[in-house]
Image (cartoon, grey):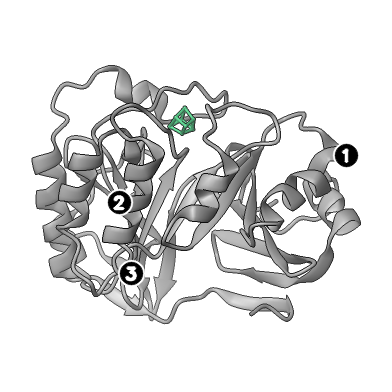
Amino acid sequence: MKKYLTREGGATVTVFVPYDCNNHCPFCINKQEYRNREGFSTEKVCESIRMLDGITPRCDFVFTGGEPFANPDDLQVMLDCVPDTHRVFINTTLPVSELFPEERIIEFTERNKNKITCINVSRHMKRYVEESNDSLLAALHVPVRVNCVLFKEYPHDGMKEFADRFGKYGIPIQFRADYTITTLENLYQREGDAILADLMKNFTYLGLDGCRIRCGYHFDNNGQHIAYHRTLPYSTLPVNVDGEEYDVLYDVLIKQNGDPHSDWTYVPLDVEAYRNVRFEPYDLKVLEGRIE
Ligand code: SF4
């Protein structure tokens, strides 16, 4: 029987909302899945949220898509299934629509401010997504972070200006590399990393943290926190602990039809094995410098 290992508290649960966004980002790996909506079900997603809460009642939940804010009523239903023992993150482009105008988004965050740990808003140096006003990000009643994917050729001389655009609202930024090209061998490799070189040029380097499958370089931009995130394109690693073989799980997923998966690579989760998961201390450590 399969044996799983995960960190104390449990693997992060990423929930793919059962409805799509209106964007077509060139680096998107989820768009394809939203083309055929057969079997997509908010109810089934909720069942899996409750099931995973039962196994790891203190894990983190991340809502992603598609676009979580494209259907505020269903998002509320799913959020209401997550008890207060969990940290909750929402990945969004923060689209404004007739259904969900600015006032309603602000009211949504006011209502859920004790539930939502952080809203991660996608903004890129090249515009791939329809953007709402920057002032809306600052008006939300929950912490906000900007996630910026640096895909292929990005404007290398625009990094400081981009950071300052959000720095004036006190909003931190996480830059992300195209993780489809990351491997176990090059995860921590610095030579030839143009993004890292640009960051070192523009901001004050604070330090590096990391674990088996991801790492983060941290910087300061006049009080604004800037991070650079690198991760592998999969979230399960085989390890041998005390002479026994385990799959270490960093993320588990709830797909749009409610199916639980153990990786981004379409591997179904063995739920019974996960009920017997072994826990280890989180291996994320500060490897260099000082990170608060
Ligand atoms: S906004 Fe997100 S889900 Fe939509 S196309 Fe871009 S990356 Fe994909």
Graded by Cα atoms within 10 Å as few (under 14), some (14 to 19) or many (20 or more), the crowding at tag 1 reads: few
Q: In this view, does 30 lie above or below 219?
A: above
Q: What element carries label 3?
A: strand
* Disc 1 + disc 2, Cβ < 8 Å: no
Q: Position of residue 90 (x, y in %)?
A: 38, 51
Q: Distance between the residues labelled 3 and 1?
A: 43 Å
- In this view, the residue farthest toward the top is 35
The residue at 76%/55% (across/down) is 189
Q: Where is residue 267 in the image (x, y as percent from the top left)?
A: 30, 42
- Above/below status of 114 relative to 112: below
Specify the amino acid type for callout 3: Leu
Pick whichever, 203 or 250, lies toward us. Answer: 203
Mark 3 or 2, closer to the camera: 2
Which residue carries the number 2 mark?
Answer: 108
Q: Which of marks 3 and 1 is nearer the N terminus?
A: 3
Question: How far apart in space, not on screen, are marks 1 and 2 (Cα)?
Answer: 37 Å
Evaluate whether residue 62 shows in this view.
Answer: no
Q: Please determine whether, in this image, residue 160 is positioned above or below residue 37.
A: below
The residue carrying mark 1 is: 157
Residue furthest front in the image: 103
- Front residue of 105 and 291: 105
Q: Which of marks 1 and 2 is nearer the N terminus?
A: 2
- Closer to the camera: disc 1 or disc 2? 2
Q: Which mark is in front, 3 or 1? A: 1
Q: Where is residue 270 in the image (x, y as percent from the top left)?
A: 19, 53
Residue at 69% across, 29% down: 126
Contact flag, marks 3 and 2 (Cβ < 8 Å): no
- Disc 1, ligand 1: is the CB inside 8 Å? no
- Amino acid type for the residue under numbered disc 1: Asp
34, 210: nearer the viewer: 34
